[in-house]
Every structure is written in structure tokens, then in C-alpha cells.
Amino acid sequence: MTDTTLVTRTEVGRTARKQVSRSAAGEWSPPADRQDPIAILEKQAATRVPALVPIRYGRMAASEFAFLRGAPAIMASDLSRSPDTGLTVQLCGDAHLSNFGLYASPERRLVFDLNDFDETLPGPFEWDLKRLTASVAVAARENGFKDACAQDAARDAARAYRLAMARLAGMGELDVWYQSADAQTLLTLAKRPKGRKALESTFAAAERHTSVQALRKLTVQGPDGSPRIKYQPPLLVPYAELGFDRDTEEEIVRRVFTDYRSTLQDDRKVLLDRFQFVESALKVVGVGSVGTRCSMALLLGRTVRQPLFLQVKEAEESVLAPYLKASRFEHQGRRVVAGQRLMQASSDIFLGWATGPEGRYFYVRQLRDMKGSAVVADLDQKMLRRYSEVCGQTLARAHARSGDRVAIAAYLGRGDSFDVAMARWALAYADQTRADHQRLLAAIKEGRILAVDA
């Protein structure tokens, strides 16, 4: 890279400060014509399985942090109301604290990274960072910490992002691409034996989350001696329980699998062909995703009957889509897969996409692949701050793979102006989340919407 190119890209970043200053980036107050947050949720519910929508509302009602998790569409609407830097990256679109975690790389190494990409789309880098810092502040309050701690933890996340981006800006292209964080990196969180022991327990639990463990937990022995899915209403149910014809839905899943297979690399097609499809069932997942069509498929190896559980999940249009440039992928499942592969240092070998009936879009991934995440509610103040730092660093690495890291680093600068602004934003949006959560509770109490615990 020539010095001239570096100078130009640096100037792009500094010029972005004229579009939105680093201090102004931290401002938030709801506009008079702000969209009704409950109406946004109701609009999303219109395309989802009606019987599952009350579960989504019930999960969001449980706490302010749960509400934030389930409300990326509300925040997307809010983010669109303020000027942005124009410094574009591949956004996660839902980069809250619980969407970072552990999973297995293809080499069976436990790595730490972003792990949810349903809302991924190119957009201004700060939108992801604002969602992350807001989630930090909401989590801190929920854990009973004072606002000073919430603000400090949010600032830590922003500072870690800024410093990581500055470091990445000085690295070569291949060096940036090969950056990753293994599980051992998280041990830097633990300065005390108690914290280290808790993290090691999390690692051990993730390593146990495999298809073999899932076979014991999610199946029973069928009449012919082969494993069959063990239904666990209302979270794992046969199609008929929600009004779908079992045979029709099984045939749909089989057709989806045929289409999905065509999106895999040739070597992975060979691997997939060594498994035999057994059956599938509807599975409720997450908070914001509840109500989308999601199936769990059980496959068995043809030689020693080794299990493989795949998740076939519906991909709807990103919540960011109304406010940003349209995705270059018309297929929403492919959009999710492409975004995940671009942002993650390593991705699931079975990751692919497919088209279902009525033109619905799906993506496919392993259901359990040594996945694990920090239990945010269990973090003490010091652990929350350090975990926020690791998430900030991870987000910067993910953004640097697609965006202009030199321009972003130049915009952020060497001082703490942007860090302080993000901490201010985080507290202001935590207040907004509290108010919106109360509106949800009121809507449930008034009978506007139905919520159930599950």
C-alpha cells in the first residue's frame, strides 16, 4: 500500500467527523415521531408462526436485557434517525453481549467470536458498536450495578474496539484475515482463581455440547431401535402440534436439504452424503427469532450411526434493510451465510442456504458444535468490564475484514472522545430500553398482545 493511499484513506476517516462528530455520535433522545416499539414487534409477528409469537413476547417480558435481545428491529429504527459516519462494514446487525460466544472451528479448536448473523447487512460501523455498548449498560443495571459501572463497562467496550482497530489498521491484509481468538484468550478476563475456574467450567461445558451429547438429550429409542426425536413441548414439537401436516413438512425439509446440499463446497457435499436423514421437528430458538420457522433435523452416519443435528432456520429480511442499501443477495439465507463467513474468523463446515416452499428462505448450520457463551447474569463488575473489552476487540476484528480499517481508525482517533460518547449513548439507550420494556408489560396487561412463559 502506498503512502498516498494511506493518506487518502486516513483523510476519509477524518472527514467523516464532519458528517457526525465523535461527541455527537453519543447523543440519543427519542424523536417526537418515534415509531411505536410495540407496533414494530407486531409487524414482525405478522410473518411468524402464530402459536409461537406469545412465547417470544413472554421471553422479552422477562427482563430489560431479554427485551433488548428481542428488539433489534426497534433499535434499527432508532439508529436510522441519527446521522451516521458513512464508514461501511459488514454489520452483524445484532451485536449484543449474548451474541458473542464459543464454538468449534473446523480444526476442532474452541474459538471465541460473534455467533448470530440473522440481521447481517453492510452499514455504518458504529451501529454494531452502539448495540454492543447499549447491551453492556442494560446488563450492568440488570446485574444490580450502579450506573457508574454501566458507563465504565460501555466505555471499556468502545475503547477496546478503538485500540483494536488502530492495531489492525497497521497490519497487512493476510495478517488481518487470519486474526482469531481461541478460548484461552478469555482467560485474560480472570484475574482471580474464582473467575478463572468459572471460565474453565464454561469451556468444559462448551466442549461437551456436541451431537453425541444432543443424541442423549434430544432423542429416545424408536420402535426399530433407532433414535427418534424426543419432543419437549412447547420448545421442540412435532409439526402436527402447530397445525402442520407431518408428511408434508418432512417432504419439505427433504427438498430443502437437496437445495441446501448444492450450496456446500464439494468436499462437504461428500461428507453430508455420508449421513442419512432420519426425521425433523419444529424447534423454538433464541428470543428475537421466536416464531420464525425453525426445524431441527436428525441425521445418522451410514457407517457407525454417528449423529449429526442440523438447524434449518428461516431467514427473513434484515431488520436493517429498510434503512440501508439493499443486500446484493436476494436470497435471505445466502445473505446470512455470506455475512457470517465474512465476519467470522472460521465458520461451521455445514453452513449453507436453501429455498423452501412459498419462496421462503432458509439457512442451515450445526445445532450443537461445542457452542457456549458467558452467562451475563453471572458476571461480577470486573468480569463484565473485561468481557465487554473482549467483545469490543472481537467486533473490531470482524469489522476490519470488510471495512476500511484505516479510515475507521482515523475517525476514532487516539483520544477517548468516541469512547466517552459511546458510554453516554449506552446509558441513554438503556433508559430507552427500560421505557420500552415497560410499554411491553403494559401491552400484555392491557391484552393488546398475549405472552406466555416458555
Image (spheres, rainbow, N blue to C red):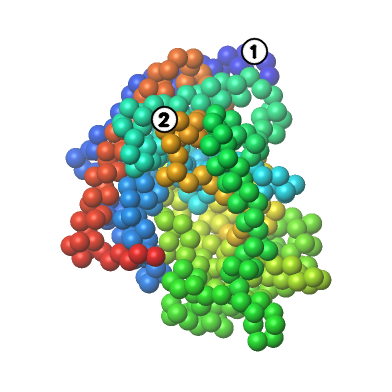
Q: Is residue 248 left or right of residue 216?
A: left
Circle 1 crowding by C-alpha within 10 Å: few under 14, some 14–19, many from 20 = few
Front residue of this view, candidates 298 and 153: 153
**Type of residue at label 1?**
Asp
Query: Counting residues from the N terminus, which is met first, the one under dot 1 or under dot 2?
Result: 1
| Residue in the picture at 45% in, 79% down | 241
Residue 350 figure quarter:
bottom right
**Type of residue at label 2?**
Ala
| Residue in the picture at 57% in, 64% down | 312
The answer to whether residue 380 is visible is yes
Q: Examine the rendered structure and indicate whether residue 129 appears above or below residue 309.
A: above
How many marks can you see? 2
| Residue in the picture at 27% in, 44% down | 434
* Residue marked by disc 2: 153
How far apart, in angstroms, are the residues tagged by discs 1 and 2?
36 Å
Whether residues under marks 1 and 2 lie with C-beta atoms below 8 angstroms apart, the answer is no
Q: Secondary structure at mark 1?
A: helix
* Residue marked by disc 1: 3
Q: Single out the mark in the foreground, 1 or 2.
A: 2
The answer to whether residue 129 is visible is no
Circle 2 crowding by C-alpha within 10 Å: few under 14, some 14–19, many from 20 = many
Q: Secondary structure at mark 2?
A: helix
Q: Position of residue 33 (x, y in %)?
A: 21, 43
**Residue 89 - label:** none
Return the residue found at the far right. Answer: 303
Q: Is residue 233 left or right of residue 83?
A: right
